[in-house]
Image: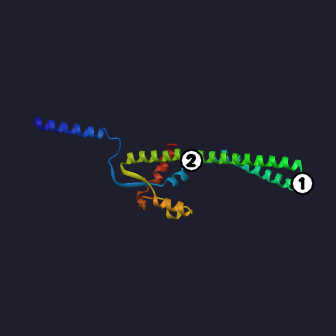
């Protein structure tokens, strides 16, 4: 009797210690899938991040476009001057200098915008991955993958489309295993 009691006690403690150290639910069969684009398009906090970025850079880029229009009107004024005159040469030099400066400023601002947009994209993608991983742990999913893009969403540029298709490892997902809405709800609840 004592041996049976000892065995039961050892089994109970052993099973308890196995479950006590688990940080995730028991694994369910099958993978789940998340549509990253939908998460970005339907999560208000992520939309606000991109909106702030656009709101900050739009006036800068519009101001540079306006400066370009002003320089074009100055170029029109040059057409009425004598190309041999000192005034024409001076104003032509100033116009060329200002155009070069404007072009460099536009390149710089576009690069700044693209870099900041990439930073926001990386940060929000990481948040989506973390939310999906936490959901996977809680629900015990065997794994979560990024849902493949739709074929109609291929880029128009043929080489880029070919690269996209070549990098595509997952061809199809069953709609019942799409947990995108759960991830979006998690992101909304925990901004």
Count of all numbered marks drawn on residues in the image: 2
Residue 144 vs residue 151, the one in the foreground: 151
Mark 2 crowdedness (10 Å alpha carbons): few <14, some 14-19, many ≥20:
few
Frontmost residue, 129 versus 70: 70
x 54%, y 49%: residue? 43
**Residue 14 image offset from top left, x and y in percent:** 23, 38
Q: Is residue 100 left or right of residue 40?
A: right
The residue depicted at 35 percent of the width and 41 percent of the height is 23
Is there any visible trace of residue 154 in the rendered image?
no
Viewer-proximal residue among 14 and 53? 53
Position of the N terminus, as image quadrant, is top left
Disc 1 target residue? 82
- Rendered position, 179 above or below 17: below
Q: How crowded is mark 1: few (under 14 residues within 10 Å), some or many (20 or more)?
A: few
Marked residue nearer the N-terminal end (1 or 2)? 1
Instruction: Please name the residue shown 42% across and 53% down the image.
Output: 145
Q: What element carries label 2?
A: helix
Across and down, in percent, residue 66 comes to 76, 50
Q: Label 2, on which residue? A: 118
Q: Where is residue 6 in the image (x, y as percent from the top left)?
A: 15, 35
Q: In which quarter of the image is residue 12?
A: top left
Residue at the spot 88% in from the left edge and 52% down from the top edge: 84
Q: Which type of secondary structure does the marked residue at label 1 adopt? A: loop
- For the question of whether residue 43 can be seen, the reply is yes
* Cα distance in 3D space between marks 1 and 2: 49 Å
């Amino acid at each position: 009797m004592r041996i049976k009691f000892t065995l039961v006690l050892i089994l109970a403690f052993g099973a308890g210690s196995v479950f006590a150290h688990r940080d995730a639910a028991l694994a369910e069969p099958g993978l789940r899938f998340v549509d990253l684009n939908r998460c970005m398009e339907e999560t208000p906090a992520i939309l606000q991040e991109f909106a702030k970025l656009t709101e900050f850079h739009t006036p800068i880029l519009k101001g540079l476009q306006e400066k370009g229009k002003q320089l074009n009107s100055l170029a029109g004024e040059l057409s009425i001057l004598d190309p041999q005159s000192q005034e024409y040469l001076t104003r032509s030099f100033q116009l060329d200098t200002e155009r070069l400066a404007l072009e460099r400023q536009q390149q710089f601002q576009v690069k700044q915008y693209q870099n900041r947009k990439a930073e926001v994209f990386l940060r929000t993608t990481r948040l989506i991955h973390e939310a999906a991983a936490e959901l996977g742990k809680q629900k015990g999913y065997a794994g979560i993958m990024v849902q493949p893009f739709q074929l109609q969403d291929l880029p128009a540029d043929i080489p880029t489309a070919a690269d996209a298709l070549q990098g595509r490892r997952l061809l199809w997902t069953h709609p019942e295993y799409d947990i995108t809405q759960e991830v979006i709800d998690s992101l909304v609840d925990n901004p």
